[in-house]
Amino acid sequence: MIESIIINGLTSGGVYALLAIGFSLIFGVARIINLAHTAFYMLAAYLIFTFASFLGLNPLLSVILSVIAVTIIGVFSYKLVINPVREHETAILIVTIALAIIIQEVMLMAFGGHPRVVPSLVSGYTEILGAKVAYKQLLAFGIALIILLCTWALLLKTKLGIAVRSTAQDREVANLMGINVARTGMITMGMAVALAAIAGALVAPLRVLEPGMWMHPLVMVLAIVVLGGLGSIKGSFVGAFILGFAETLVVFLVPMGAFLKGAVALTIMLIVILIRPEGLFGVAFEEER
């Protein structure tokens, strides 16, 4: 039991960390709360299904093509739909949730409401501390960890990372320093959507696909960024594993816990908002950023 909770918690935490860090990146750089973020996660999963099952492509090639395609779609969505209303917070919320629903309806029209299954890159099981663990779970966690480390290195060790962090800290100062803030925002959107697409690719073999599969991850991402601090990369990472394990504990230990995991995440989010609105690693006031 304990071994299964640890493995599932690590896998969920890794996937949620990819989603939450991407969400925090685009908020930090462009001050955009992108409610369509997890819809791109869903789109990647469905594209893998399309490439692998309909077109008969190799599963690995299907994953690569889907991540590239979703990233391109995300960048065009930012340029054509989101960026024109970026200065209007309410409009951004409306536009991004409308974009998510459009993606959902397109998936519903294309694939119907029937559950779909994506073939896994690997098959079989192994035993860890007496618990049977699927290789696809280990692969998902391993790749998530590698991508998170690469994202950390990109943000801290490259010129692009410096530009992203500078823009996130102060757009006006970054602009005065010669950083192309608009270009940085578009690149950051591409990074965020790519992280969401990778998360979708990792989850696709672990669950059945259905057009509403983006909603629960969105609830989790919102709870994670509130817990960790909106815009905080470190907070998103830590919050993802906290809520990943909390969700796993509820599913394994609470009767009918699978129906309560969303409620638990929202409860934690509400408690954090009431007790510490800035989150674990956030700042209390916008002018402190």
Image (spheres, rainbow, N blue to C red):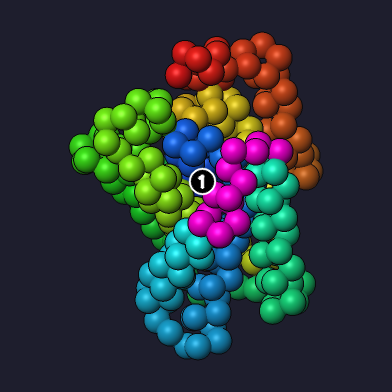
Q: Position of residue 65 (x, y in %)?
A: 41, 73
Vertical arrangement, residue 186 with respect to residue 31, above or below? below
Asked whether 83 falls inside the magenta stretch, the response is yes
The image quarter in which residue 246 lies: top right
Residue 93, quarter of picture: top right
Q: Quadrant of the C terminus?
A: top left
Question: Vertically, is 57 above or below 271?
Answer: below
Of the residues shown, which amino acid type is indicated by label 1?
Leu
Residue 249 versus residue 278: which sits nearer the camera?
A: 278
Residue 84 lies, in percent from the top left, at 58, 50
> At 70% from the left edge and 43% from the top edge, which residue is drawn?
91
Q: Which residue is mark 1?
A: 19
What residue is drawn where x is 58% and y is 43%? Answer: 86
* 10 Å crowding of disc 1: few (<14), some (14-19), many (20+): many
Q: Which residues are magenta?
A: 78-90
Position of 234 with respect to 179 (left or right) is right
State the image coordinates of residue 214 (x, y, percent, origin top left).
65, 55
- Is 234 one of the magenta-colored residues? no
Q: Against 160, is 134 above or below?
A: below
Helix or strand or loop: what does disc 1 sit on? helix
Q: In terms of depth relative to the viewer, which is nearer, 67 or 100?
A: 100
By secondary structure, the bulk of the magenta-drawn segment is best described as: helix
Residue 70 relative to residue 82: left or right: left
One can see residue 87 in this view: yes
- Can you tell which quarter of the image residue 53 is in? bottom right
The quadrant the N terminus occupies is top right
